[in-house]
């Protein structure tokens, strides 16, 4: 008899707790959880450069935490040549193939200033960790003169740790879906390493290959650019 009474009391408490939670959720503008998908540099629609996937947890309509992983990829192919200024003669002609990949991990605290409005403004920031690598290789090399030098290969690795800041607007076009546009910038301490292989030849000399390694540290302020995204709340 006592166990049945305890069970009934426990069930009644859980039911009342669930009902209170449902009423609380129904009165809120934002649902508690969401996934966000953001695209870098959406203004220049010439090429896709990467995206940022985030999970956002709303403590209330005015405050939220967001953790995200971003991947950014850039590729390009450009013509390059060298002129010998004494004779105005082109000494070589080549294509430069460039590729860069950057991975970011960030955690942000967000503040919503007007959650009851149709267009909701927010701002926030938090820690950031980033790793990037890039390579540049020549292709279709055409040597014309006797004197020339060019990079056979360029490689760069970089690590960054610091703070990221964001501000933007969000519009909920459905109860569980929203569009947002934002702009951001980073303040970081960075460490970079460059490795270059230089090929050169001058009259009277043999072709030589120089390996050059450089390291650089310091602080950097860099804008993250404009992002457009979609939020799915649940």
Image (spheres, rainbow, N blue to C red):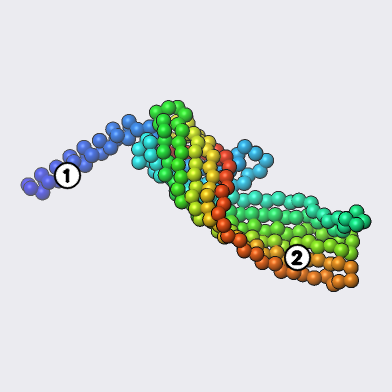
**Mark 1: which secondary structure?**
helix
Tell me which corner region of the image, top left, top right, bottom left or bottom right, holds residue 151: bottom right
Tally the marks. Answer: 2
Disc with the residue nearer the chain's start (1 vs 2) = 1
Q: Residues within 10 Å of mark 1 (few under 14, many from 20)?
A: few
User: Residue at 42% of width from left, 35% of height from top?
Assistant: 112
Q: Position of residue 216 (x, y in %)?
A: 61, 61
Q: Residues within 10 Å of mark 2 (few under 14, many from 20)?
A: some
**Mark 2: which secondary structure?**
strand
Q: Is residue 200 visible?
A: yes
User: Residue at 35% of width from left, 41% of height from top?
Assistant: 59
**Of residues 70 and 13, which is closer to you in this image?**
70
Find out whether the residues at labels 1 and 2 contact each other: C-beta distance under 8 Å: no
Q: Is residue 61 above or below residue 4?
A: above
Q: Is residue 201 rendered to the left or right of residue 169?
A: right
Q: Is residue 35 visible?
A: no
User: Residue at 57% of width from left, 45% of height from top?
Assistant: 223
Tell me which corner region of the image, top left, top right, bottom left or bottom right, holds residue 31: top left
Q: Position of residue 165 (x, y in %)?
A: 49, 44
Q: Which mark is residue 130?
A: none
Q: Nearer the viewer, mark 1 or mark 2?
A: 2
User: Residue at 73% of width from left, 55% of height from top?
Assistant: 97
- Please, which residue is most extreme toward the left here? 1
Tell me which corner region of the image, top left, top right, bottom left or bottom right, holds residue 21: top left
- Which residue is disc 1 drawn over? 10
Q: Is residue 8 above or below residue 152?
A: above
Q: Position of residue 166 (x, y in %)?
A: 49, 41
- Which residue is disc 2 drawn over? 198
**Of residues 127 and 54, which is closer to you in this image?**
127
Q: Position of residue 67 (x, y in %)?
A: 45, 48
């Amino acid at each position: 008899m006592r166990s049945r009474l305890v069970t009934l009391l426990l069930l009644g408490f859980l039911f009342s707790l669930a009902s209170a939670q449902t009423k609380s959720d129904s009165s809120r503008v934002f649902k508690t959880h969401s996934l966000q998908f953001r695209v870098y540099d959406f203004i220049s629609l010439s090429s896709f450069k990467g995206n940022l996937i985030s999970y956002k947890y709303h403590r209330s309509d005015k405050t939220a935490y967001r953790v995200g992983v971003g991947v950014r990829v850039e590729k390009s192919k450009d013509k390059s040549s060298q002129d010998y200024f004494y004779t105005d003669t082109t000494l070589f002609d080549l294509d430069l193939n460039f590729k860069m990949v950057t991975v970011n991990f960030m955690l942000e605290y967000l503040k919503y200033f007007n959650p009851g409005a149709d267009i909701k403004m927010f701002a926030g920031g938090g820690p950031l960790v980033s790793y990037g690598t890039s390579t540049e290789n020549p292709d279709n090399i055409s040597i014309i003169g006797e004197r020339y030098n060019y990079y056979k290969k360029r490689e760069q690795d970089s690590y960054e740790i610091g703070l990221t800041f964001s501000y933007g607007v969000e519009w909920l076009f459905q109860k569980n879906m929203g569009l947002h546009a934002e702009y951001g910038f980073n303040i970081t301490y960075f460490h970079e390493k460059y490795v270059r292989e230089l090929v050169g030849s001058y009259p009277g000399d043999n072709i030589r290959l120089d390996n050059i390694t450089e390291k650089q540290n310091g602080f950097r302020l860099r804008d993250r650019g404009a992002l457009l995204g979609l939020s799915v709340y649940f």
